[in-house]
Amino acid sequence: MQKAAWCTCLALGLAVATTSVPAASADLAGSWKGGGTVKFSSGATEQAHCRATFSPSGKTAYDVSATCATSSGTVSQTAHVRGSGSSYRGTFYNPEFDATGKITIAVSGRSQVVRLNSTKGSAVIRLSR
């Protein structure tokens, strides 16, 4: 798969979304890394390796920046996420490919499962500290 096609599909959401987090909920702040599977709208799949940084942007919100790589190339994105407890959701944006989509995050201790969806594809990424 060509890098441009990969990046456009991957751009669908490997940057994390916005989450409202009460004081007693999981703290996403800091660096996370891991990997998972990206499925393109064409049906093709690729393994991805990702790093994400969550920065508090308010009492219940985070700004997120993420970089993911597959055999096709590398893409960086940003997002803002909100949530409660161990469940977060929001939207992501990749300015390079003008791609947006929805993201959900389920946190359990020092790990999280990130699910991304857009018209260009989907991804399931498992991150840990």
Image (spheres, grey):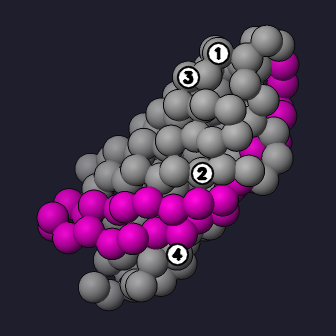
- Neighbor class of circle 1 (other Cα within 10 Å; few <14, some 14-19, many 20+) is some
Q: Earlier in the sequence, mark 2 or mark 4?
A: 4
Identify the residue under disc 1.
Answer: 85
The answer to whether any part of residue 108 appears in the image is yes
Identify the residue under disc 4.
Answer: 69
Name the amino acid type tagged 1: Gly
What is the quadrant of residue 12 in the picture? Answer: bottom left
Q: Secondary structure at mark 1?
A: loop
Q: Check the picture and name the quadrant holding the N terminus.
A: bottom left
Name the amino acid type tagged 4: Ala
Identify the residue under disc 3.
Answer: 87
Q: Position of residue 81 (x, y in %)?
A: 63, 32
Q: How far apart in space, not on screen, are marks 3 and 1 (Cα)?
A: 6 Å
Q: Earlier in the sequence, mark 1 or mark 2?
A: 1
Q: Secondary structure at mark 3?
A: strand
Q: Where 107 sits versus 53, above or below? A: above
